[in-house]
Image (cartoon, helix red, strand yellow):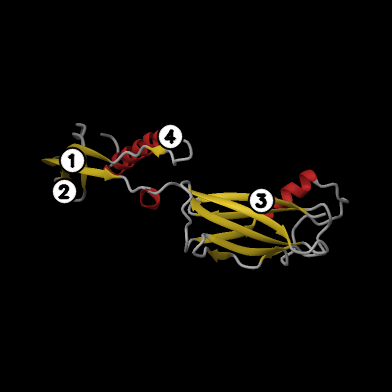
């Protein structure tokens, strides 16, 4: 064993995670309309046998713990203390959302006033089985860098035009909590001074699910 115990455990955890990702791509649908059955690795038991050596120089100036015999060589004399140990443990899977089906976000857009750049953003959070998720925090953000990149790439604006969004282009709230119906809504307002043809990339995130909505200012 050339690494540390941490290296071994991290490598084991990464292997289990990789196996779970492959399993997550496989599902079984028994009846049309029902949530598909997902496979989950429940636990992985492991056993690590270690042979430890404590090597101390006779001058008492240095000591080190290693997992394999020290190589011989010249220099000062050394004292070696050996010990064996067995490390046992388990990696236990913790399903997301307590094992419930993965969440589904459904986003609805409505322009409030055709004379202004204001939209109502309505998000419904539910499980894949259709169960409403109440009390979930939905995060709303304007991705300003992505917006600038889209405007630069897709919009035909004069060269002297600033591509950065105004600080007044923002959501009415950065976080909104779903009600008993699993619904949360906020308002997105763009500064009327933004150049026509600009783009806004709005990011909606909840429970590890992310949606990006692109707006074009016309």
Residue at screen point 28% across, 35% down: 2
Determine whether the residue tagged by mark 4 lies in a helix, strand or loop: loop
Between disc 3 and disc 4, the foreground one is 4
Q: CA distance from mark 1 to mark 3?
A: 69 Å
Q: Nearer the viewer, mark 4 or mark 1?
A: 4
What secondary structure is found at the residue carrying circle 3?
strand
Dot 3 and dot 2 residues touching (CB under 8 Å): no
Residue at x-position 21% and y-position 48%: 62
Q: Is residue 107 left or right of residue 147?
A: left
Task: Return the residue at label 4.
Answer: 29
Q: Are marks 2 and 1 in contact (CB under 8 Å)?
A: yes
**Mark nearer the N terminus (3 vs 4):** 4
Q: Which mark is residue 76?
A: 1
Residue 114 x %, y %: 81, 61
Task: State which tag comes first along the sequence, 2 or 1.
Answer: 2
Please determine whether, in this image, residue 84 is positioned above or below residue 124: above
Q: In the picture provided, is 28 more to the left or to the right than 53?
A: right
Rendered position, 75 above or below 101: above
- Which label's residue is closer to the chain start, 4 or 2? 4
Q: Which is nearer the N-term, disc 1 or disc 3?
A: 1
Task: Determine which of the numbered discs, if any, sits on residue 213 in the image.
Answer: 3
Depth check, mark 4 against mark 2: the one in front is: 4
Label 1 CA crowd tier, 10 Å (few <14, some 14–19, many 20+): few
Corner quadrant of residue 4: top left
The mark closer to the camera, 3 or 2, is 3
Q: For label 3, count other residues whose C-alpha is less than 10 Å away and answer few (under 14), some (14-19) or many (20+).
A: few
The percent position of residue 120, horizontal first and vertical second, equals 68, 62
Using the image as rendered, state which of residue 113 and residue 5 is in the foreground.
113
């Amino acid at each position: 064993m050339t690494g540390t115990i941490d290296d071994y455990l991290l490598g084991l955890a990464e292997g289990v995670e990789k196996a779970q990702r492959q399993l997550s791509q496989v599902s079984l649908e028994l009846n049309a309309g029902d949530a598909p059955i997902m496979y989950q690795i429940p636990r992985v038991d492991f056993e690590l046998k270690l042979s430890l050596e404590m090597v101390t120089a006779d001058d008492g100036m240095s000591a080190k713990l290693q997992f394999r015999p020290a190589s011989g060589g010249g220099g000062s004399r050394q004292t070696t203390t050996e010990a064996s140990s067995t490390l046992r443990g388990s990696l236990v899977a913790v399903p997301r959302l307590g094992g419930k089906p993965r969440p589904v976000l459904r986003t609805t857009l409505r322009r409030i006033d055709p004379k202004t750049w204001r939209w109502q953003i309505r998000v419904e959070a539910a499980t894949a089985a259709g169960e409403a998720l109440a009390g979930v925090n939905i995060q709303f953000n304007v991705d300003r860098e992505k917006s600038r990149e889209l405007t630069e790439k897709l919009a035909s604006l004069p060269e002297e035009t600033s591509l950065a969004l105004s600080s007044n282009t923002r959501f009415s709230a950065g976080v909104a909590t779903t009600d008993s119906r699993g619904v949360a809504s906020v308002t997105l307002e763009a500064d009327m001074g933004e150049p026509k043809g600009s783009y806004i990339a709005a990011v909606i995130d909840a429970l590890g699910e992310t949606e990006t909505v692109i707006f074009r200012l016309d």
